[in-house]
Image (cartoon, rainbow, N blue to C red):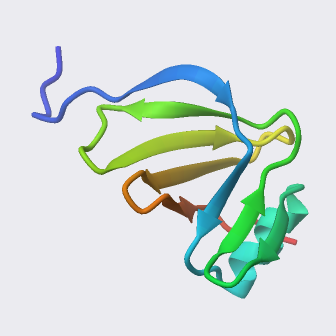
């Protein structure tokens, strides 16, 4: 029974994660992503983050009308949260800085 008045959060089926577009990326985030095997490049309008091979993501439920939130599992065990705005075809990635 859910007693905190919030809908339960569950995960959808795992799917292969490829790449995402980010409108901005700070230096610390870039270093952290690269340290965990991600490739970062920049085009004219956004940063392109390419996840390493064998990265999977699972949709976090419940979903929102405009965004879909995912837990992203990198092959080395590092986890991210990806929030994808499907109307604008752009994402935000939330990460936990790790020690070098």
Q: Residue reaching furthest top?
A: 1
88 with respect to 22 (left or right): left
21 with respect to 2 (left or right): right
- Residue 38 locus on image (x, y percent): 84, 58
Dividing the picture into quarters, in which one does residue 16 lie? top right
Above or below, comparing residue 85 to residue 65 in the picture: below
Residue occupying the point 51% across, 41% down: 70
Quadrant where the image shows the N terminus: top left
Residue occupying the point 26% across, 43% down: 64
- Residue 45 locus on image (x, y percent): 61, 81
51 with respect to 87 (left or right): right
Work out whether residue 93 or residue 41 is closer to the camera in this orientation and state it.
41
Dividing the picture into quarters, in which one does residue 26 lie? bottom right
- Residue 66 locus on image (x, y percent): 29, 51
Q: How many marks?
A: 0
29 with respect to 91 (left or right): right
Residue occupying the point 43% across, 34% down: 60
């Amino acid at each position: 029974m859910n007693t905190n008045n919030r809908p339960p959060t569950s995960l959808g089926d795992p799917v292969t994660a490829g790449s995402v577009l980010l409108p901005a990326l700070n230096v610390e985030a870039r270093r952290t992503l690269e340290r965990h095997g991600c490739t970062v490049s920049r085009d004219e309008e956004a940063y392109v983050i390419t996840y390493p091979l064998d990265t999977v993501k699972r949709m976090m439920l419940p979903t929102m009308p405009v965004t879909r939130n995912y837990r992203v599992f990198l092959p080395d065990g590092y986890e991210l949260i990806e929030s994808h705005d499907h109307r604008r075809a752009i994402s935000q990635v939330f990460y936990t800085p790790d020690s070098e």
